[in-house]
Amino acid sequence: MNKLITYLKEKHTVILGVVIAVIFLVTLRVSGLAVQYIIKAKGYTAMLLEEIGAMIVSIIILYITGMNHILRKKGKGIIRGLYIGGFLVVIGVIALANSFVNITNKTNNSHIQPLFQIIMFIATMLAVGITEEFTFRGTILNLYIDKFGRNRKGICVSIVLSSIIFGAAHVSNILSGASLKGAFIQACGAAILGALLAAIYLRSGNIFVVVILHAFNDFSVLIGSGFFGIGSPTNVVNSYSYLNLIGLCIYLIPILVLLRKNKTEEIIKI
């Protein structure tokens, strides 16, 4: 097994990254079927159980590929890392405020969910952040950097490839009831967001910084569903319009700022 992984890492790194993403998606689907037909859980409890299954696999993959060392790297620390990712902190706060405005406009009789359901929602958001960041930034991005080199060109190529795979993975939400249009727009957005998360991760040197940012932004967008039972993740995806793609262009600015030449030198030294 070790020889096979070493061979794939050295000779077929890009394909290995795609295979890891496919394993991640298959694990989610298999976990989902098990939860649906065996455990028969619903809502965010079901989603949390699905994510736990995928999380276990993502951690196993980290160890199999030899990337588990990233779990011990503190880099610039959580606080400094969140400062580096300040753009996403601000975006998350704005999304949170917007979610509350939408909740107020939609109904004056909204009732907060039971405490257990809220806990399940928060735990699910955290699990999504852990699972996706361990898989796409922790494993795939690092595999590509090892392949293409820890230099400016290698870093840019690695970010682009890993982010495309991250975005493409979201097309699978069609299987959960998302429309083709919504899934396509989400995939494009996820690819850009993935590039920004990759830049923040490489600048901070701490995988848990992007786990927190990822979880917080998902929490902000879905709080109406998680706290008040209004809508669902699929409804959110189906509500996307092509105007959302235009808004995503602003994400390119912090990506370019974080990866400017003198800051790329910092990444190379981490």
Image: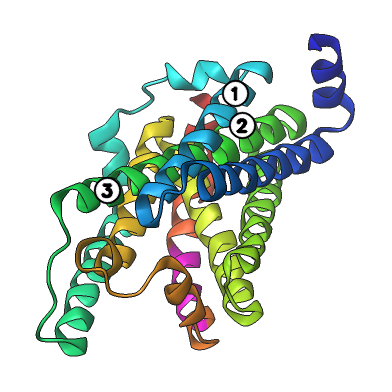
Residue 184 among magenta residues:
no
The colour scheme of the drawn protein is rainbow
Residue contact between numbered discs 3 and 2, judged by CB atoms under 8 Å = no
Residue drawn at (44%, 40%), measured in percent from left and top? Answer: 49
* The N terminus: image quadrant: top right
User: Against 269, is 27 above or below?
Assistant: below
**Label 1 sits on what residue type?**
Leu
Gap in angstroms between the C-alphas marked 1 and 2: 6 Å
Taking depth in this image into account, of 10 and 127 the one nearest to the observer is: 127
Determine which residue is flagged by label 1: 62
Determine which residue is flagged by label 3: 122
User: Against 259, is 13 above or below?
Assistant: above
Return the x and y of residue 141 as percentages of the image width and height.
Answer: 63, 38
Residue drawn at (76%, 43%), measured in percent from left and top? Answer: 18
- Tell me if 258 is positioned left or right of 173 in this view: left
Residue interval drawn in magenta:
246-253
In terms of secondary structure, where does tag 2 sit? helix
Determine which residue is flagged by label 2: 139
Q: Tell which circle, 1 or 2, labels the residue nearer the N-terminal end.
A: 1
